[in-house]
Image (cartoon, rainbow, N blue to C red):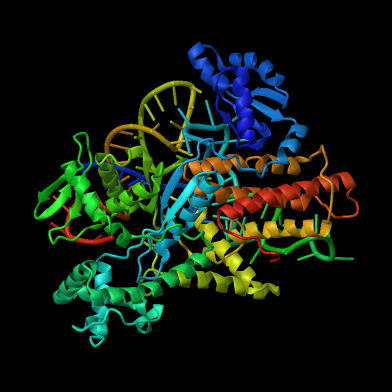
Amino acid sequence: MNLYKYVSDKLNEKLGFVAKLEVPRNRDFGDFSTNAAMVMAKSAGKNPREIANELLPKIKELDFVSDASIAGPGFINLKIKDDFLWNAAQTAAEITRTAKPMTIDMDYGAYNVAKSLHIGHLRTSIVGDTLYRLGRALGHKMISYNHMGDWGRSMGMVIAWIERLHPDWPFFQENFDPTADYSGYAMPVAELDTYYPSAAALAKTDEKFMERAQIITAELQNGHAGYNALYNVFIPVSLRSMDEIIQKLNMLPFDNNLGERNAAKYAEPVEKLLRDKDLLQQSDGAEIVVVKRDEDKKPMPPVMFRNSRGASTYDATDIMALYYRKITDNPDHIIYLTDSRQSLHFEQLFRVAKLLGMFPESALEHIGYGTINGTDGKPFKTRDGNAAGLNDIIDMVQTAVRERVAESGKKLDDETIDKIALAALKFNDLSHDLRSDYIFEPSQITSFEGRTGPYILYTAVRLNSVLRRAGKFDTPKTATMGTDERNLVMELLDFDRTVQSAFDSRATDLVANYAYDVCQLVNTFYHNCPILREDVDTETRNMRLALIKIAVDVLGKTLDLMGLKIPVEM
RNA sequence: GUGCCCAUGGCUCAAUUGGAUAGAGCAAUUGCCUUCUAAGCAAUAGGUUGCAGGUUCGAGUCCUGCUGGGCACGCCA
């Protein structure tokens, strides 16, 4: 149950006034606090404390309130009855499903094929996955899209590079046979990875090569049999490696791996829509859509539908992708999760969608996350100056975990080590405000003490261990709780509220930080409150076991929202 | 040049979206393992929230102006 909401609703009902309920930072003040008196004082022209005195008796009438008092400038602090808390705690792990389920498309990942995932894909993947899980847990119909970069100029570059390496391959010959089997030409992914960077570097200095890549891109898109056959050879290699990482990160698989190539199929209907509304204009040989408005204070360049060479730009493919989603899912809402540097692009895109009458702007949302920087404040790079590969980063954390385990003399299997490493990596990412840049420091990610993912797992592992040892027990109907137990119950009863606001405000850090807060209280409780010792009476023992059970349920669900699993031991 | 974002202990981050005494972790110092897993617990120290004004019962949070940094601004995605 959502204690906050329950108390808030009852309080407002009693006072006939919508007041803001707060959880005091300092628990000594009480369980909850309201500034109702201070807000009312303004309109009534009275002293806040005077009004608080009038409200106090009414609040004390509420059956779940054990005590209420006035403090400071006019806050009314209240305490909840222990029996009520204990009863409520039994359903602390339940998530209240939304009253208005929506169909929500989520666009995250957006991986480029023929280019391995690197650190720049970490946030969109992890945060996107968690938002998806949150939405689903709340009862929305979530549909995820990996809008892959699989049809642009980078494809032409890769093919041009392969042509340079193997001009003798059949794909480049006049008498190419499209019916033959070419799967034997598939290259290892490590090799494929080098093609695009090499090609891009060459294209910078070699105009002829660049031109060749552009021609190939156009011919590929126009159905050139050889290039398409080659494309179909290396795409599966890339997709397989993508899948591997998705699994390693324990992400839910994408509902749709549909990118630019799929979107491009809808060029015709989209162009027709634009023409019908008379939105396409000629400008310097290109075709554009003007999205600037009179009230704009900031620069608002037009949307480029087709460049002067006649090729579709990503502005265009994004409109087409939007069209595709409209005619297939017809979602109530679409969330795009990308680097914040693309904010302007999405603002433009949303304006086109509105001009076309496809979606109102309120249905489209872009979440721009901050970049992951190194200690120098610039985007994180490895020593050789390249963006660190996601596989390398995962390996790095796994190695650190393995060393840590070896040092302690523990023996843990590989599966456990993977779980711990993943917790370290994901918790680190999720615990930051997703809209701000953050600094990726390997030494911090590979240390597992304190505010880290392994700390969370460790806490859960210890609780499970106690439950295993305890065996069966009866959950008491009432409970006499000490401070540590009560504090923990209060925090556990904040689970539902945390989930709701994490999704509402698209703040995945709330989930991660909540997990940490719970663990801190659990560990204090664990340390101060013995359970299986002989001198603990049955009643206390059962109460504490029941509390641990609730804590494990809540922690388990919280970890599940982050795509993390609790090991058996660590 | 125009616009958007950011600035909080030595370091990395919080602060219930305007609330009470600005909280955690790391690093430092110090206690606690024969007792449910020490990847833990507890304690000490560390702050004029970049600067200057303003708004109000109340500002790290909102407004204005500085300073310093990041990003974006039609044929790359």
Q: Is residue A529 left or right of residue A422?
A: right
What is the quadrant of the C terminus of chain A in the image? bottom right
Quarter location, residue B50: top left
Q: Residue furthest bottom?
A: A168
Nearest the camera: A395 or B32?
A: A395
Counting every numbered tag in the picture gives 0
Front in this rendered view, residue A452 or A305: A305
Question: Among all residues in the image, which is located at the extreme left?
Answer: A284
Residue A276 quadrant: top left
Asked if one can make out residue A122 in the rendered structure from this viewpoint, the answer is yes
Q: Is residue A477 positioned above or below A133 on the image?
A: above
- Which quarter of the rendering shows the N terminus of chain A? top right
Q: Nearer the viewer, residue A520 or A175?
A: A175
Question: In the image, residue A284 lies at what x, y percent?
Answer: 9, 53
Residue A145 against residue B63 in the figure, above or below = below
| Image coords of residue A208 (percent x, y) | 14, 76
Q: Is residue A374 visible?
A: no
Instruction: Residue B9 in the image: state x and y as whole percent.
Output: 50, 51
| Residue placed furthest toward the top | A45
Q: Residue at x 47, y 45 (%)?
A: A506
Answer with left or right where residue A147 lies relative to residue B42: left
Q: Residue at x 13, y 54 (%)?
A: A286
Q: Is residue B47 left or right of residue A264?
A: right
Q: Indicate whether A434 appears above or below A455.
A: above
Q: Position of residue A32 (x, y in %)?
A: 64, 31
Seen at 21% across and 58% down, the residue is: A312
Identify the residue at horizontal 24%, vertical 40% (top origin). Answer: A355
